[in-house]
Every structure is written in structure tokens, then in C-alpha cells.
Amino acid sequence: MANMLVGSCGINCAECNAYIASITNDDEKRKKSQRNGQKTITLPLPRR
């Protein structure tokens, strides 16, 4: 079994678009990840 890096969010980082965008410094992937997250995350996020 290969080692897995699992974030505090519970997602395997090797499959996480936000993580991949960060390590490859890809702004287009960051934007895509943000749009996808806005559609799939249904929990209310705290406001500052």
C-alpha cells in the first residue's frame, strides 16, 4: 500500500485539485477548483 497524504479536510491530496494547483503554481487550476468547490460544498462557511 502506498503512503497517502490526507488533509484535515479528509481528501487524499494526490486527488485534490486545490492541492495540485498549489504545488504546480497553476492559477487556472486554482480558479477551476474554486468554482468546483462552490458547487459541491454545501456547509455554511463562517464569515469574518
Image (cartoon, rainbow, N blue to C red):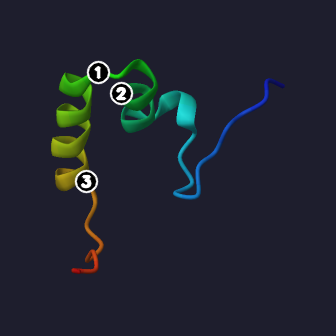
**Three-letter residue code for mark 1:** Asp
**Three-letter residue code for mark 2:** Ala
- Viewer-proximal residue, 37 or 26? 26
- Indicate the secondary structure of the residue bearing disc 3: helix
Q: Are marks 1 and 3 in contact (CB under 8 Å)?
A: no
- Viewer-proximal residue, 11 or 20? 20
Position in image of residue 22 (x %, y %): 40, 31
Circle 2 sits on which residue?
21
Q: Which mark is residue 26?
A: 1
Residue at figure coordinates x 17%, y 35% from the top left: 31
Circle 3 sits on which residue?
40
Screen quadrant of the N terminus = top right
Q: CA distance from mark 1 to mark 3?
A: 21 Å
Disc nearer the start of the sequence (2/1): 2
Q: Residues within 10 Å of mark 3 (few under 14, many from 20)?
A: few
Q: Which mark is residue 9?
A: none
From this view, report whether residue 40 is shown above or below residue 27: below
Q: Nearer the viewer, mark 3 or mark 2?
A: 2
Q: Quadrant of residue 33?
A: top left
- In the picture, measured across the screen, residue 10 lies left or right of residue 1, that is left
Q: Are marks 2 and 1 in contact (CB under 8 Å)?
A: yes
